Structures are given as C-alpha cells and as structure tokens.
Amino acid sequence: MSVIEIENVSFTYHGDKRALDNVSLSIEKGEWVSILGHNGSGKSTLSKLIVGLLKPQSGTIRVDGITLSASTVRDIRKRVGIVFQNPDNQFVGVTVRDDIAFGLENLQIERPEMIERIEHYAKKVDMYPYLNKEPHALSGGQKQRVAIAGILAMKTDVIIFDEATAMLDPEGRERVMEFMRTLNREGTTIIPITHEMKEAVMSDRIVVLKDGKVLKADKSENILKDKETLERSNLELLLPLEIMHYMNENGIDNPSLKEFLWQLSLNG
C-alpha cells in the first residue's frame, strides 16, 4: 500500500528554472527510500512539498490517501514528520522538554500522556538527562537527537530526514543512522534526503534526482551498480563500488572478491 503518492509535481522558486519538473513517485508503507541527488537536484524542495511547507504549482501529493491541500495539511503533518539538516531551525522551546512538547501541544495531547511521551522518547534517544537544558547549549549531535525525539513523540508513520547528518561528526552520523534502522525495523517509513552514497546503501529503494527530474528509481542494489546513472547525477561512487566497476570493465572475474566489495559498500 502506498503511503505517499506524488503525481506530476512541479515547483519553481520566484521565476527561476524549475526546482522540480513533473516528478512522479510512490513510497510504500514501511519502506526505506532514499532521495539521492547532488546539490540543486530538487531533493530538499521535494521534502518540503511532502509536508506542506511549500505548495506545488502543479500536480498532486497524497499521504495515506489524503490529498495535500491547505485544508488537510494539519492532518498530513500528523502522519509525516521531518528532521532538517540544521536542528536549530526547529527549536522553539526554552528547554529540551519544552521543545519535545511543542508538537504534542499542537496535536492537543492530554498533559499526562504528553509527559509520558516526552520522557519515553527522550530516553529513547539518550537525551533524558538533558530535558531541562537549553537546546542551544547542546552539541550538534545532541541537538539532532532532540529534533528526532520531538518527531518520534508525535508518532508519525513517516519520517523524512532532510540532510539530517550533514552537520554531524562520524559518531553523530552513525547514531542517527542507527535510529533510522531501528525505526524502520519497527515499521516506520523512512525517507532520507541525501547526497551521501554511504547513507543510501541501506535503503530498500533509491530515487535519483537530477535538475528537478527523476533520473532513475530502482532497488538500491541496482542503482548502486549503475555506474552510468551515478556519474550522470554527479554522485561520488563508494570506493568498493569503484573497484567493482573497474573489475567489470576490465574483464576481471573474481566472484568472491566482488561479493566482499559489495558487502563492504553496504557497511558505508
């Protein structure tokens, strides 16, 4: 069952060339689908359209069968949460506790349940000891975990991670990726927006965007082995995949080495 359906969506910023040009795709419930593309490909614009932060100039977006519009956007945001690249842009509370509570207040959650959710999800992302801290006093990785807790507390069915690891160190990045794995195993639909190949390798599917259009959408394994598509989209190949492509192009047949390189690429 498709949880997100995007049909012939286009969007232009202030008379510039189209950021998205007639994009169509669908995402199934419980899938992990990476939207992969270089800067300027339109991937972040797509994420903002899905949650109603931008309005498509043409085309239709449906979430759980509900067509996105001014009258339904509030309902859509109960189903789809988004974590941005810079968590500072999401903070509205004086403390971590206040910030996690913000989305719950908008949903009009009763206070006893709100307190329970705040504490539960703060513990889930290892931020419970910081509930009374000011968000801006936290490290980048801690801020991102607070932003994730705020989305988790709202219990959305879909979470978009819009370049959510771009400002993190390797340890912070790995923690966020582990959250994605756990959430997906629990049934949450995960949509990372990224230009990082090492993040896309764990996806069920990859949608490659270039110049506002879908260049290719396929199973992750097929995309990662498609050197032509990745080169056309100006994406950097992972080193193990580069070696595999070199072996294929030069007729080097070593199945065990190729399998090792493939498994190595899956480890990011």
Image (spheres, helix red, strand yellow):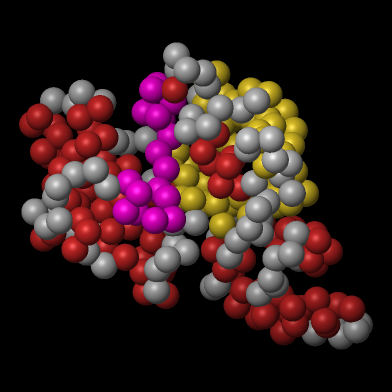
Is residue 227 within the magenta segment? no
Q: Nearer the viewer, residue 263 or 69?
A: 69
Left-right relation of 247 to 103: right
Left-right relation of 150 to 263: left
Residue 169, position as x, y percentages in the image? 39, 74
Q: Which image quadrant is residue 201 in?
A: bottom right
**Vertical arrangement, residue 200 with respect to residue 1, above or below:** below
Q: Nearer the viewer, residue 136 or 251?
A: 136
Left-right relation of 163 to 245: left
How many numbered discs sit on the rendered protein? 0
The single residue placed furthest to the top in the displayed view is 71
Q: Which image quadrant is residue 242 in?
A: bottom right
Report the residue at 22% width, 48% height from top. Answer: 121
Q: Quadrant of the N terminus?
A: top right
Residue 138, position as x, y percentages in the image? 22, 64
Residue 217, position as x, y percentages in the image? 72, 47
Report the residue at 58% width, 42% height from top. Answer: 45
Residue 1 in view: no
Query: Start and end of the magenta stretch?
Result: 74-90
**Vertical arrangement, residue 120 with respect to residue 130, above or below:** above
Q: Nearer the viewer, residue 216 or 68?
A: 68
Report the residue at 10% width, 29% height from top. Answer: 111
Residue 188, position as x, y percentages in the image? 43, 42
**Vertical arrangement, residue 167 with respect to residue 60, above or below:** below
Is residue 75 within the magenta segment? yes
